Amino acid sequence: QKQVQAYRIGFSQCSTTGPWRQAMLDGMKRELSFHPDVELRVVNAHDNSQQQQQQIRELVRGGIDLLIVSPYEAGPVTPAVEEAHRRGVPVVLLDRRTASQQYTAYVGGDNLEVGQTAARYAARLLNHKGSIIEVLGTPGSSATTDRHQGFAQALGSHPGLRVVSQVTGDWTEKTLPALATALKAHPDVSLIFAHNDGMGRGAYEVCRQLGLAKKINIIGVDGLAGRNEGLDLVQRGVLTASVLYSPGGEDAIRTALAILNKQPYKRENTLGTIVIDSTNVRTMQQQTDKMVTQQEDIERQQSLLQRLQATYASQQTILYGLLAT
Ligand code: FRU
């Protein structure tokens, strides 16, 4: 039996798929498994805003009913997203924003809050005094701008805490040679705030090589499950803490479908955050393990249902055949 296509959703992903982006996509697919009549077209710009603009224009030209986009850099991706919106294609911004108000809904964490949360945690940990290095994500990504701003804002009320150096890490752990230089120039540093756990992992490696791993606390962002990801890194003491930042794939699809089906939806959909450290990491891990088991149950039920439907369809064919003779 052929499904009637209800909607075509285009998804423009900014970055090459690492575990966090994969979790986002998995979340979308999980939610879409309840809507087999919706097609998702995914394109990936591999950290290139020009390519992302081109891909968005191609998606729109090819005919989509809604665009989900996670923009690499806010400014450079804005024109293509505005064009889509002006042509009447609803736009859901996911995780990162453009530099424009022309969008239908936003789904994702509040990155100002992420930065503030990291700063408040750092203040308590360091007893309100000490030197900090900040490792930033790609300049121009809205997540970088907001995490930085939130962090600076909240540190403002702690005059004893000082960011002595900033290093740009481009969201990956491979881009941190400048960190070693900064650490050598500032031997009094006692904390590193890395804008994501991957760069936190890289920062740890640099500290370890300089013999500083025991002395320096590292705070990351994401708190993903899986080997070498945030929860694991906190559990192993590589990171002192990780600020949870959910990929939000399910939520993006739910918002997209509400928009398409003309149901009520919110324009700003903020996903909550918490600090994960040694006090709650076990609980978080148990919860994510439970979610994985539940998801496997759902998938088993879905495939059973499909098999039953297939059996039913073939029995009907036989029945109609008999009736016809
Ligand atoms: C993945 C990622 C995450 C980060 C988010 C910010 O590409 O770098 O680690 O939290 O993007 O937009």
Image (spheres, rainbow, N blue to C red):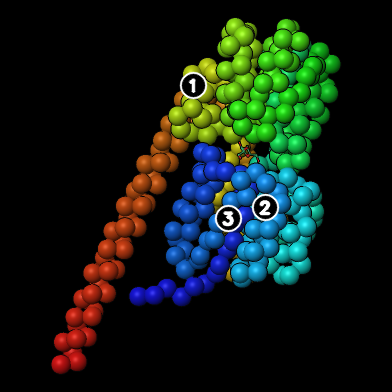
Q: Which mark is residue 43?
A: 3
Q: Is mark 2 within 8 Å of ligand 1?
A: no
Mark 1 touches mark 2? (CB < 8 Å)? no
In the figure, residue 289 lies in which quadrant? Answer: top left
Q: Amino acid at mark 1?
A: Gln
Q: Where's residue 238, x and y in %?
A: 54, 18
Say which of marks 1 and 2 sits in front: 2
Q: Earlier in the sequence, mark 2 or mark 3?
A: 3
Q: Residue at x 37, y 41 (%)?
A: 293
Residue 112 in view in this figure: no
Marks 2/3 in contact by CB < 8 Å: the verdict is no
Question: What is the C-alpha distance between the residues marked 1 and 2?
Answer: 38 Å
Q: Pinpoint residue 266: horizontal percent, then vertical percent.
A: 68, 57
Q: Is residue 76 above or below residue 137?
A: below
* Residue density around tag 2, few if under 14, some if 14–19, many if 20 or more, within 10 Å: some
Q: Residue at x 23, y 75 (%)?
A: 314
How far, Cα to Cα, is label 2 from label 3? 10 Å
Give the position of the N terminus as an image quadrant: bottom left
Crowd rating for badge 3 (residues with CA inside 10 Å; few <14, some 14–19, many 20+)? some
Answer whether labels 1 and 3 touch (C-beta < 8 Å).
no
Q: Give the residue type at disc 3.
A: Val
* Image mark for residue 235: 1
Element type at mark 2: helix
Secondary structure beneath label 1: helix
